[in-house]
Image (spheres, rainbow, N blue to C red):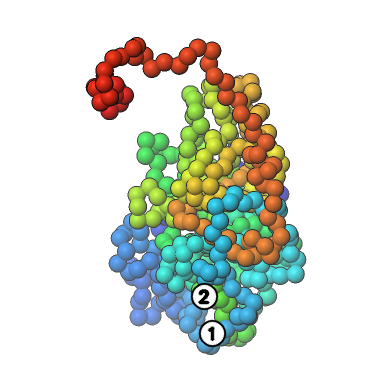
Amino acid sequence: MPITKFSTPEKYRYQNGFGSYHETEAVDGALPIGQNSPQKPPLGLYAEKLSGTAFTAPRHENQQSWLYRILPSPAHTNFEPREHETYNTNPTGKTFHHLPNQLRWDPFDLDETVDWVHSLKLIAGAGDPTMKSGLGYFIFAAGKSMSENEAFYSADGDFLIVLQHGVLDIQTELGRILVRPNEICVIPRGIRYRVMLPEGAVRGYILELYEGHFQLPELGPIGSNCLANIRDFQTPTAFFEEDTETEWTLLSKFNGRLFAAKQMHTPFDVVAWHGLYYPYKYDLARFNTIGSISFDHPDPSIFTVLTAPSHRPGTAIADFVIFPPRWLVAEDTFRPPWYHRNTMSEFMGLISGDYDAKAGKGFSPAGASLHSPMSAHGPDAVTHEKASNADLQPQKIGTGSMAFMFESCLMVGVTEWGLKTCQKVQKEYNAESWLPLKPHFKRPGKKIENGVKNVEGIDGDKSQLPHYT
């Protein structure tokens, strides 16, 4: 069955469908009928609009939701800077290291001393959230739940969370989400939430998208199904708390800096909502993998789960790609990914198991790699040797494994934390992976000829020219 066998059982109910118009109410009659903002909303609630796109964005891109809550969200004190000397998840361009080197990191450490907000470490990125352009890649490792009366949101972009270890119990304004390893979760810009850790320490990766929103890739000649199917995405149902007497702290990540405000009511008081702008999760085991059933290794774009397109057709600001368990049946084919130089940047992580293109064991769960634009990469020497001599029978690979890639058309730079402070960069990545490759070239036994025999004529004569001109 194409679902993950989770050790932690699900405890919440969800609505299904990617990009679907949802409506949900925790109390019957909380949603107004036929209008969004009546003079007096039902049950004495306040109507509040949450806009994830401009009002006039095209219908197929427009993302808005209407929330019906006990108190409206602007009822808080002024935001004040918090920890500005130490908290900065948006370095300026001067502090990014743009390198042509292939980079790989050992597994990142767990840290049981910090909560979700303080676990976010920017490892790489490009662009500027103030211009709503680009993205950031984060490593998170936390060991404590957020404080009981604390909520957080990012004004900078959408969080795509890839959990590698532990369990996230996320209370959002629009409902609750349980996230386990092999599930991803997307929390759009501005949505307030609190992260609890019911099973202790957690670790994983985040892609923060500063521009646009994620969507499903076009399927083209594949047809109407396969890859990540629409019905398999899960959205929370309305859940609320009634608390207008307790002091809460609201934390905002705004241009990479942390700000805090106080309010005398819970931010989790949305009794009902409807719309297209909401958090969601997805079980990666439900991905319907496509591959070659004749010969050659297709482009990895066939493994795209979510994409955030740029203004250039077919070119993404960010693609989220996975390499799940799958069958390889291609005949007379080098089955691992080929050697490659790419105009895109490729950041990879490993949730569990082994990655089939890196048999040398240097790429481990909770580790990562970055191959920048036009930086050559591909199977290591061990993998090449095995694949070049393998018996090409139908083969199931990746059982118990899940690797992923954040791919971007941008030239992604590495932060000081990612390059030095974390102390996880593998200095011998190239030496272990590709320097051991040996030449196998052998000249054929007879002279190579072009099929033209003793042509006479002067330079420039038509018979002297190659036939493709």
Image location (x, y in percent) of residue 447: 47, 14
In depth, the one of 36 and 404 nearer the eye is 404
Tell me the element at label 2: strand
Q: Residue at x 48, y 24 (%)?
A: 294
Q: Is residue 1 left or right of residue 235?
A: right
In depth, the one of 129 and 379 nearer the eye is 379
Q: Mark 1 and mark 2 in contact (Cβ < 8 Å)?
A: yes
- The mark that comes first in sequence, 2 or 1, is 1
How many labels, in total?
2
Tell me the element at label 1: loop
The type of residue carrying mark 2 is Phe
Q: Quadrant of residue 336?
A: top right
Q: Is residue 417 above or below residue 306?
A: below
Q: Is residue 76 left or right of residue 166?
A: left
Image location (x, y in percent) of residue 421: 69, 65
Question: Residue 79, which numbered label?
Answer: 1
Question: Residue 254, which numbered label?
Answer: 2
Q: Residue at x 70, y 57 (%)?
A: 424
The quadrant of the image that shows the N terminus is: top right
Question: Residue 36, which numbered label?
Answer: none
In depth, the one of 442 and 31 nearer the eye is 442
The quadrant of the image that shows the C terminus is: top left
Q: Residue at x 62, y 65 (%)?
A: 416
Image location (x, y in percent) of residue 344: 47, 49
The CA distance from mark 2 to mark 1 is: 11 Å
Crowding near the residue tagged with mark 2, few <14, some 14–19, many ≥20 C-alpha atoms within 10 Å: many
Q: Is residue 33 left or right of residue 375?
A: left
Q: Is residue 187 above or below residue 351?
A: below
Crowding near the residue tagged with mark 1, few <14, some 14–19, many ≥20 C-alpha atoms within 10 Å: some
The type of residue carrying mark 1 is Phe
